[in-house]
Amino acid sequence: MLRKRKFNLIVNMCLFLYLIIIIIYSMSRFGYITYIAFVMNIPVIALFIAIKLGIKNSIRDTLTYIDFKKYKGYYRECIKKYSPAVLSYIDNFEIDNYKDIIATLLNLKLKKYIDITETGIQILNNNLENLAHNERYLLNNLNNWNTKIFKESVIRDAEKSRLIEFRTDGMKGIYKRLIILFIVCIILILLWNIIYTLPDGEIYLGNNFIIKLDINIISTIMLCGILGIPFMMLPYAFVYLIASGLYVRSKKGNEINEMLEGLKNYIKECTILNKRSMDELILWEDYLIYSVIFNQNKKVMQEFERSFYVNTDIKEDK
């Protein structure tokens, strides 16, 4: 979701810069923004707005209030029932193929399935019965794992644990919003036809002056909506479907997410885990792993980079 928010910010900046360029160019060439120049740019502006709304609504419909509001609570208990990668996915619906695989390997080391040294990974235990699917996959493919398959296995584990559920309201939400846009477009067409027939002048109610009617300005504004809405509908639906994904958190998943937010606060504000190294895993156990999936420990990741980790394909999707 963080990437979607960054992309949304980029879209906003591009739209702002584009409008500034149009204004500067039009004023330098014509002295003012002409009617034709403005109308010609409506499809481009509508496309930007469609992308922005699609991303914004997909984030809003996927996440909950706790993701947008700074959670101030603390949670100190380890959530041992779920693998680190699954917890990371529940946190933000993303799998970072760098930190999440590191966290998974640390968890396997903590459980004494592997040993991590400067020269590589040594398997200590081949009994995979009590491991999550993503952990089993990683353990069976230590030298040639595929980050796409790893992500799919994480989602599979999250769904099996009933932390996420298949999105059933996605298309329903799109249909509802597209119908609203279509109705607004029809209303604007009707009003435009009515207003376009009116003469310029001042409107009075009895002897009281109400408003001075500028037909050109009003009809141009309505025409922008009439032309812009059709250019928004299909791009909006496409961006929404791509950005929203197939899953949302279940009730159980939202409970776990609240615990994760509390763990973030605890690790960030009440510990110094950002200074702890991989050698201290025995001492800090799961908390050190959580500090990795919450991006609160760069030291451990740097240790992986300096050792064997740079020789793997972990960064193939970066």
Image (tube, helix red, strand yellow):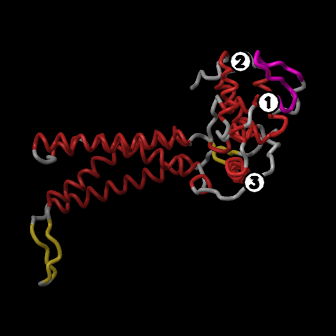
Q: Which mark is residue 21?
A: none
Front-most of residues 159 and 183: 159
Report the amino acid beneath label 3: Tyr
Disc 2, SS = helix
Quadrant placement of the N terminus: top right
Q: Which span of residues is magenta-colored?
A: 107-125
Query: What residue is shown with label 3?
Result: 75
Front-most of residues 119 and 256: 119
Of the two numbered discs 3 and 1 in the rendering, the one whose residue sits closer to the viewer: 1
| Cβ–Cβ under 8 Å for marks 3 and 1 | no
| Figure check: 14 above or below 213 | above
Residue 140 pos. (x, y %): 79, 20
Q: CA distance from mark 1 to mark 2?
A: 15 Å
Q: Is residue 211 left or right of residue 158?
A: left
Q: Is residue 200 left or right of residue 193?
A: left
Query: Of callouts 2 and 3, which one flags the residue occurring earlier in the amino acid sequence?
Result: 3
Residue lying at 14% horizontally and 69% vertically, measured from the top left:
212
Residue 268 pos. (x, y %): 67, 48
Q: CA distance from mark 2 to mark 3?
A: 34 Å
Q: Which mark is residue 308?
A: 2
Q: Is residue 233 visible?
A: no
Query: What residue is shown with label 1?
Result: 279
Which image quarter: residue 96?
Answer: top right
